[in-house]
Image: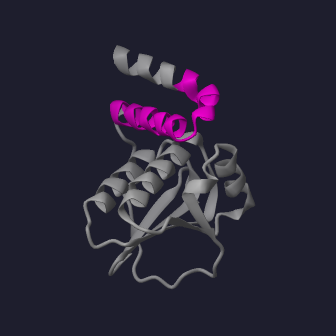
Amino acid sequence: MSENAEIFVSKDKDSFNIKVCGRATFAVAPTMRNIIQRIASDNDIRHLSVNLASCDGMDSTFMGILTQLALTCNKMYTEKVKVLNPGEANIKLLHGLGLDRIFNYVTIAEPQIGNWDKEDCSKPSFRDNAETVLNAHKTLIETVPNNAKKFDAVVTQVEKELKNS
């Protein structure tokens, strides 16, 4: 397993599936943000799943991006984003930020999905990464206002770094 997570996607008719393998951090958050943009522009998609069976953990930036994904998709579809096989540790992380109401947790055997394509998770530019971190944390705060206590300092620091770059 690589140091950073690897992200795989598969599209089958009206379903879009994402699989996260490894530790999901800010390093792969821009890749997930780009996936959200692709999903939002595809009118054929009606179902979305994120498989976390092989996800060793998540940082707050990645959870903020997952929140953006859920909020985007909850506007587009009638069903919530399915988080497949999240495991107790990842559920605890999401619940700790008050995000349990925006996902549908499902434990199933490994779904038989067609071809998985590995996403390019190459290192983004400083600005791209900083903007992704900033937007992810703002989303966490907007979605659950109690998260402001946890992330106001992060938002302030990243805004300062972006201003000085």
At a point 32% along the width and 81% down the height, the residue shown is: 13
Residue 161, quarter of picture: top left
x, y percentage for residue 49?
49, 69
As drawn, the residue found furthest toward the front would be 78
What span is colored magenta in the figure? 126-154
Indicate the quadrant containing the C terminus: top left, top right, bottom left or bottom right: top left
Image location (x, y in percent) of residue 52: 59, 64
Is 156 drawn above or below residue 19 in the view shown? above
Query: Is 3 placed above or below 6 here?
Result: above
Position in image of residue 39 (x %, y %): 33, 62
Residue 132 shown in magenta: yes
Residue 127 occupies quadrant: top left
Q: Is residue 85 visible?
A: yes
Indicate the colouring scheme. Answer: one colour
Query: Is residue 25 in view from this perspective?
Result: no
Q: Position of residue 114 (x, y in %)?
A: 41, 83
Q: Residue at x 33, y 71 (%)?
A: 45
- Residue 134 colored magenta? yes
Between 105 and 157, the residue placed more toward the observer is 105
Dominant SS of magenta comes to: helix
Q: Is residue 63 above or below residue 91?
A: above
